[in-house]
Amino acid sequence: MSPAQADPEVSASKIGTTIDFDAPGRQTGFLRVPHSTHESAYGWIPVPVVCIRHGTGPTMLLMAGNHGDEYEGQVALSRLARTLRLEDVQGRLIILPAVNAPAAAAGRRTSPIDGGNLNRAFPGDPEGGPTAMIAHFVDSVLLPLCDYAADFHSGGSSLAYVPCAQANVFPGMESRNKTVLELLDVFGAPVSYVATRPMGAERAFGASARRRGVIAMGTEAGGGGTVAPSAVKMLESGLHRVLRHLEIVPELAVEPGRGTRLVEVGGPDYFVYANESGLFEPAVELGEGVAAGQLAGLMHFPLTPWRDPDPMYFARAGMVLCRRVPGRTERGDCVFHLGSDYRGL
Ligand code: CA
């Protein structure tokens, strides 16, 4: 065997589970992520999972808690897992409402155990820390079972979004891109953004889904380290429309969709970063339209109050899609990003 070939004994996931993903019915349980510590020599970290399989139809993976401090998806998927009736399903749903469970339990973006950012850890490593092992299980065990996937994010502790749906499009994949844009339209968030240069690039979940041939979408619902009712409603009503559209839950009662405004988020000119550390005063609100060169905010220095504030400007025109939440801000922190009307790749 050449060194480039993976040894199946080495590359197999070390994560076990009592869930049989091929079995019909509703199963609830945990992925068991081995984690040997002083307190628990042969212990494992539980990652909750619900598998609902009935009839015939596609398989969809539903994830939230990829970043543990992004709560709207965790609320929505927990509710879906409790309330969906088995007999209404045609196909299979694999639901992971707190996929990076240690991060979700801590209410933090990253895992307090290994510092791992799950959405920068794909395709993962079966021999790595807990975060890498979870990424590897999702990539190598779950995604091969799936036709569709949704990964529900929000702004988390440091950012707030105009509640929106989100997906990635890739050059040279026109048919896939068309299907993804159709799903965004069905989901029907007031705004959907297409990342032409996704954060996390090839280490993000979206890249793993693309490599595995799985049609994937998600959200950036709300954020700010809290749960906005309007963001949860946007997420749930959109998810219900998608489940019905894909005929995984063909009779699900849904509110009619009204399409979406598609915007794109491209390169560095869409983002505004702090040049100085201080107290951030935004000059615009979420959802506002801005012009190139417009003032984005001021960085104040209350501990040197006679110093003039440092202005930050938008490098291009667009809609304010995301802004920083905490006032205290360090040089290098993202304070805004924009979207602009989607013009295609
Ligand atoms: Ca996120």
Image (cartoon, rainbow, N blue to C red):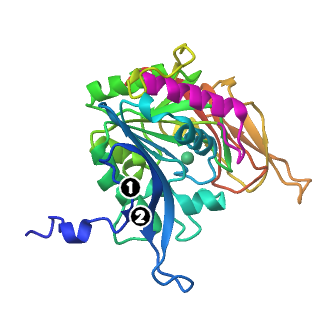
- Main SS category, magenta section: helix
Q: What stretch is highlighted in magenta?
A: 222-244
Q: Which amino acid does label 1 sit on?
A: Ile
Q: Disc number at residue 19?
A: 1
Q: Nearer the viewer, residue 233 or 332?
A: 233
* Quarter location, residue 171: top left
- Asked if labels 2 and 1 touch by Cβ distance under 8 angstroms, the answer is no
Q: Which mark is residue 74?
A: none
**How crowded is the residue under tag 2: few (<14 C-alpha within 10 Å), some, or many (20+)?**
many
Q: Can residue 195 be seen?
A: no
Name the image quarter holding the C terminus.
top left
Above or below: residue 131 compared with residue 241: below
- For discs 1 and 2, the disc positioned in front in the rendered view: 1
What residue sits 52% from the left and 41% below the top? 81
Residue 102: x percent and y percent?
57, 63
The residue nearer to you, when weighing 99 against 114, is: 99
Residue 140 percent location from the top left of the image? 30, 55
Residue topped by disc 2: 132
**Could you tell me which residue is drawn at 48 percent across and 77 percent down?**
43
Whichever of callouts 1 and 2 sits on the residue coming sooner in the sequence is: 1
Quarter of the figure with residue 153: top right
Query: Does the stretch in magenta take in 243?
Result: yes
Quarter containing the N terminus: bottom left
